[in-house]
């Protein structure tokens, strides 16, 4: 079985945060069934680091990121994107309000991460995310839709998850990895289930921890794998 690119162009909205978007592009390139430059997809990207903080908007009444998210995604469509991807989970709490208005399909990171977790561990998975994503219940909604049981960390554990995210955004990978190891050990004492890294900074923290990759479900990996399926056809 071989795969050939179908000519669809990908639009990526990054900057939330920059390291997560860069990791998404790295993972995507690794997953593409390509042997030459020309066999990789054309990608249009906007790295908009000035989009207001999603967690601040949800939990503390900060400026809404919705207008810039919508404007940037529509700009990617104007640039020629046939498929859209946004490597930020919390942003989808806002994107869900207007995604049906977009002129081209959006590969939904939360939907794809839940499906990947269900495939790896039908009995359920831990969900690590921003405190805002947890508070909105968006992952819980998609998990219920697909019949996946989610295990939600307590408040203290959720604080640690947020701290790991902060370290990754500040490029402090050693500290992020150390915290992830401690948090994972605590979670696995309660339920020995895979950890779903439902924030795109968290896969980087998990990798820095040295923990077994087979015990995690990366939202970055899930999004990249789903994007590849839309950009390549079987031949």
Image (cartoon, rainbow, N blue to C red):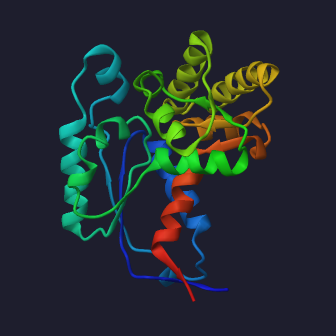
Number of numbered discs on residues: 0
Q: Position of residue 34 (x, y in %)?
A: 58, 79
Q: Position of residue 157 (x, y in %)?
A: 62, 15
**Image quadrant in which the C terminus is located:** bottom right
Q: Nearer the viewer, residue 95 or 119?
A: 119
**Image quadrant in which the N terminus is located:** bottom right
Which residue lies at the image location 53% right of the left edge and 22% below the top edge? 162
Image-based side of 31 in relation to 25, left or right: right
Which residue lies at the image location 76% right of the left edge and 33% below the top edge? 193
Which residue lies at the image location 56% right of the left edge and 11% below the top edge? 155
- Residue 40 visible: no
Image-based side of 119 in relation to 55, left or right: right
Q: Is residue 114 above or below residue 29?
A: above
Write down the quadrant of residue 81 in the picture: bottom left
Write down the quadrant of residue 152 in the picture: top right
Image-based side of 90 in relation to 163, left or right: left
Which residue lies at the image location 53% right of the left edge and 58% below the top edge? 224
Q: Is residue 224 above or below residue 234?
A: above
Q: Is residue 18 above or below residue 37?
A: above
- Residue 61 visible: yes
Residue furthest top as drawn: 156
Q: Position of residue 154 (x, y in %)?
A: 61, 13
Q: Nearer the viewer, residue 119 or 104?
A: 119
Q: Position of residue 65 (x, y in %)?
A: 25, 34
């Amino acid at each position: 079985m071989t795969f050939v690119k179908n000519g669809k162009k990908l639009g990526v909205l990054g900057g939330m945060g920059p390291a997560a978007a860069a990791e998404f592009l790295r993972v995507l390139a690794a997953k593409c069934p390509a042997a030459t430059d020309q066999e990789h997809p054309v990608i249009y990207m906007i790295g908009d680091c000035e989009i207001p903080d999603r967690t601040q908007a949800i939990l503390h009444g900060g400026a809404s990121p919705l207008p810039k998210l919508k404007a940037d995604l529509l700009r990617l469509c104007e640039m020629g994107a046939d498929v859209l991807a946004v490597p930020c989970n919390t942003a989808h709490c806002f994107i869900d309000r207007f995604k049906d208005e977009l002129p081209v399909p959006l590969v939904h990171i939360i939907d794809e991460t839940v499906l990947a977790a269900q495939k790896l561990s039908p009995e359920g998975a831990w969900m690590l995310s921003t405190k805002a994503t947890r508070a909105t219940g968006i992952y819980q909604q998609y998990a219920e839709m697909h019949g996946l049981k989610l295990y939600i960390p307590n408040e203290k554990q959720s604080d640690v998850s947020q701290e790991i995210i902060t370290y990754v955004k500040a490029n402090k990978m050693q500290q992020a990895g150390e915290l992830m190891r401690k948090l994972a050990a605590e979670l696995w004492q309660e339920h020995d289930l895979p950890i779903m890294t439902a924030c795109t900074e968290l896969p980087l923290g998990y990798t820095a921890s040295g923990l077994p990759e087979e015990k995690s479900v990366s939202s970055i990996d899930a999004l990249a794998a789903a994007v590849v399926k839309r950009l390549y056809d079987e031949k």
